[in-house]
Image (cartoon, rainbow, N blue to C red):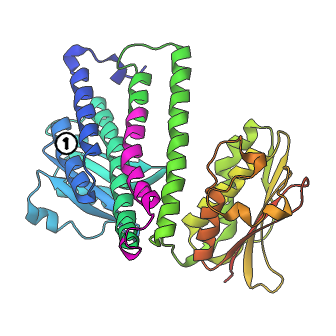
């Protein structure tokens, strides 16, 4: 058990939990990205007793920029508002004017991706307790900031569409535009309280209770993944989900996706491999290609029986015009009559109706590949397995 879990009442752990709970409620009533960033900075300073705090977020180019501060003179902040890259930690310490042992910086993480940074300058040497509190706040803030970002992206486009259609039957779009705020915040709170309980801050727990908490956390993560799919679909429908046009090493991205799904395939005693072959360069968005591959391979793992095989291969077409990534499995296959339908939003075939999911993964993948100027297709006959093929313009 960590030192954090051995706090006593004198250490003020319950006061810290009360403050974290109050901050979580405040986030649930704050929807603007700037307001959430400012709230994170001010509440972080109060929670940690810090003399200064900084919230940094990735901009559209993937660089970190200062979005909110507390306890730092505006003139000083202005000199540090240029995009920060490799020297971010050193420059942050300069901005906060703090020694190494009084400085805390933790990442803001959503869905496994780093979206920003929360840093604080303390008037004392930072302790493990300070680091834990900063991380707990960062976890809450990351969800609230992502919620606000998604809301700001989707809501204006949906409102334009509502005006264009003169308010005609768009209740679904209005509901989707509020999902991030109404569902992400409580899901983040559930995950946070699971962490608090697992750390023993409310007292020791036994193995059976720890297992139950793990199942609660897993259920919350599943709900969050479903929400992410719904919001991705909303962004695509609203035309606000962009992709980057850059050279991409398809084999490297394929290796990344295979590595991410290997534990899941191992649990089902499946063989998940990537076929040998040369590297292939194509035009596209590496992060979005990885997202599509994770969905395709994840589906293959889900629908392929135990002891089945899944093979990922990378090649170019005969004319070298297109780069291809194929995901082939030995599962039940998809009937020819359904091959167009599976790319439609919310479509669920009769054979998959009892399995988890809401039928958005393939629709999102198809739309993303199309935005990159490529195609996503399927071949193979029941019951001989399926092969999904991504084609992107080669270099």
Camera-side residue of 348 and 389: 348
Camera-side residue of 151 and 118: 151
**Magenta-drawn stretch, dominant element (helix, strand or loop):** helix
Occupied quadrant, residue 247: bottom right
The quarter of the rendered structure image containing the C terminus is: bottom right
User: 197 left or right of 326?
Assistant: left
Asked if residue 34 is positioned above or below residue 211 in the image, the reply reads below
Occupied quadrant, residue 192: top left
The x, y position of residue 208, in whole percent, is: 56, 15
Asked if residue 347 is positioned above or below residue 268 in the image, the reply reads below
Answer few, some or many: residues within 10 Å of disc 1's Cα (few below 14, many 20 plus, some between 14 and 19): many
Q: Which residues are magenta?
A: 163-190
The x, y position of residue 109, in whole percent, is: 42, 49
The quarter of the rendered structure image containing the N terminus is: top left
Query: Is residue 203 something that shows in the picture?
Result: yes
Residue sitting at x 84%, y 55%: 333
Camera-side residue of 36 and 64: 36
The image shows a total of numbered marks equal to 1
Where is mark 1, residue-wise?
43
User: 141 left or right of 317?
Assistant: left
Residue sitting at x 66%, y 63%: 344
User: 280 left or right of 337?
Assistant: left
The x, y position of residue 77, in whole percent, is: 15, 63
Query: Is residue 104 something that shows in the picture?
Result: no
Residue 183 magenta: yes
Camera-side residue of 321 and 49: 321
The x, y position of residue 278, in whole percent, is: 77, 71
Residue 88 magenta: no
Circle 1 sits in a helix, a strand or a loop, which is it? helix
């Amino acid at each position: 058990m960590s030192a954090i879990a051995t706090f006593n009442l004198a250490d003020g752990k319950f006061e810290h939990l009360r403050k974290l709970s109050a901050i979580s409620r405040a986030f649930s009533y704050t929807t603007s990205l700037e307001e959430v960033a400012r709230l994170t900075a001010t509440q972080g300073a109060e929670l940690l007793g810090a003399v200064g705090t900084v919230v940094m977020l990735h901009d559209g180019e993937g660089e970190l920029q200062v979005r909110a501060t507390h306890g730092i003179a505006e003139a000083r902040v202005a000199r540090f508002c240029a995009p920060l890259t490799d020297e971010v930690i050193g420059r942050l310490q300069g901005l906060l004017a703090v020694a190494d042992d009084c400085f805390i910086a933790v990442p803001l993480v959503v869905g496994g991706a780093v979206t920003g940074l929360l840093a604080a300058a303390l008037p004392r040497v930072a302790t493990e307790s300070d680091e834990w509190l900063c991380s707990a706040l960062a976890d809450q803030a990351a969800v609230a900031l992502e919620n606000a970002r998604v809301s700001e992206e989707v809501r204006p486009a949906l409102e334009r569409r509502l005006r264009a259609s003169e308010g005609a039957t768009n209740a679904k779009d209005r509901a989707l535009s509020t999902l991030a705020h109404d569902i992400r915040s409580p899901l983040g709170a559930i995950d946070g309280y699971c962490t608090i309980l697992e750390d023993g801050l409310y007292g020791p727990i036994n193995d059976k209770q720890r297992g139950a908490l793990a199942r609660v956390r897993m259920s919350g993560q599943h709900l969050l993944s479903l929400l992410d799919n719904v919001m991705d679909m909303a962004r695509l429908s609203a035309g606000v989900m962009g992709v980057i046009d850059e050279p991409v090493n398809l084999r490297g991205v394929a290796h990344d996706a295979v590595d991410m799904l290997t534990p899941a395939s191992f649990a089902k005693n499946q063989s998940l491999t990537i076929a040998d072959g040369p590297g292939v360069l194509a035009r596209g968005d590496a992060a979005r290609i990885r997202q599509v591959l994770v969905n395709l391979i994840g589906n293959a793992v889900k629908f392929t029986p135990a002891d089945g095989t899944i093979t990922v291969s990378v090649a170019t077409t005969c004319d070298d015009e297109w780069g291809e990534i194929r995901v082939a499995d030995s599962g039940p296959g998809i009937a020819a009559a359904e091959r167009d339908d599976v790319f439609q939003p919310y479509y669920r075939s009769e054979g998959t109706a009892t399995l988890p999911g809401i039928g958005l993964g393939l629709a999102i993948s198809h739309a993303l590949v199309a935005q990159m100027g490529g195609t996503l297709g399927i071949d193979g006959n029941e019951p001989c397995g399926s092969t999904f093929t991504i084609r992107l313009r080669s270099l």
